[in-house]
Image (tube, helix red, strand yellow):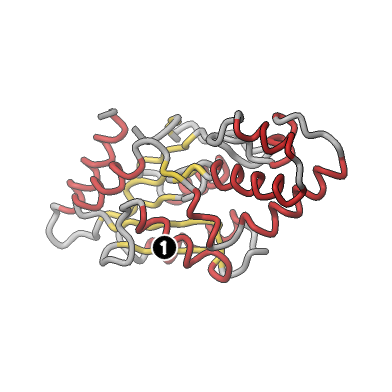
Amino acid sequence: MSKLVTDAVARVANQASIPGHKPPVVVFDLDGTLFDNGPRTWQILVDFAEHEGNATLRRTLDAAPRTRLPYLLKETLESLGITDGNIVTRAQQFWMDRFFTDDQQSHDIPISGALALVRALYEKGAIIVYLSGRDVPNMLVGVCLSLRAHGFPVGLSRTVTVLKPSFHDDDLTFKKSALAFIDGLGEVVATYDNEPANCNAFCERWPHALHVYVDSQHAPNPPPLHGDVAIVDDLT
């Protein structure tokens, strides 16, 4: 078990053991933090290839990686040798119509160490907050089903799922707006996210907590990461 994991567990256990103190809270993002959504994109591209009758793309996908895919679909397509503008445009629309939906989340897989970490923190008494840029109208049902299917604590006391009210809401603005609500739950002792901007916002809000950046994928042109944020490849 890594030092970062034992540190997080210790912080939760210490906070939970103090009579009369606020309960410990740990905040987790989903995409790129607890879950690798690469298989979701891979499956959508398989469906696209079959929809288009593109046997070459279908064969290429069988030999291509399914995890740790680039943040931008265009980069994934380029890695597959797809640069024709018409095909890229159709693929992007096909992907956009499906990626942000309930059903497609079933293809996501937990990032290494994610389940064990969340369970350990929950068992030590943490309130687990799933704070994600996924949205309620299109993705809430899929979020809960995916968390439950993989064994994460969800729908239980000391678990909270916070998603965007609308798909069109800006992710960072939404997450900043949720910080006051999270403060009302207890004492934030650790946060985990794959976007530097979100990690920086958490670090500024809760300077005494442990903040972890999961270096999996992120939006283009991120800000410099705050110096107090730890960097990991996964959650082992």
- In this rendering, the answer to whether 101 lies above or below 49 is below
* Residue 49 rendering spot, x and y as whole percentages: 71, 45
Image quarter of residue 116 = top left
Q: How many marks?
A: 1
Is 160 on the left-hand or right-hand side of 99?
left
Residue drawn where x is 41% and y is 61% of the image: 145
Q: Residues within 10 Å of mark 1 (few under 14, many from 20)?
A: some
Q: Residue at x 41, y 63 (%)?
A: 144
Looking at the picture, tell me which residue is in the foreground, 233 or 74.
74
Could you tell whether 11 is left or right of 180 in the image? left
User: Pointer 1: what residue?
Assistant: 144
Quick one: SS at disc 1? helix
> In x, y percent, where is residue 48?
70, 49
Residue kind at label 1, given as amino acid type? Cys
Q: Nearer the viewer, residue 202 or 55?
A: 55
Is 123 situated above or below 142? above
Q: Eyeballing the image, is 21 above or below 235?
A: below
Residue depicted at x 62% and y 54%: 99
Tell me: 201 left or right of 114. right
Q: Position of residue 224 (x, y in %)?
A: 60, 34
Q: Quadrant of the N terminus?
A: top left
The x and y percentages for residue 52 are 77, 48
Dividing the picture into quadrants, the one containing residue 232 is top left
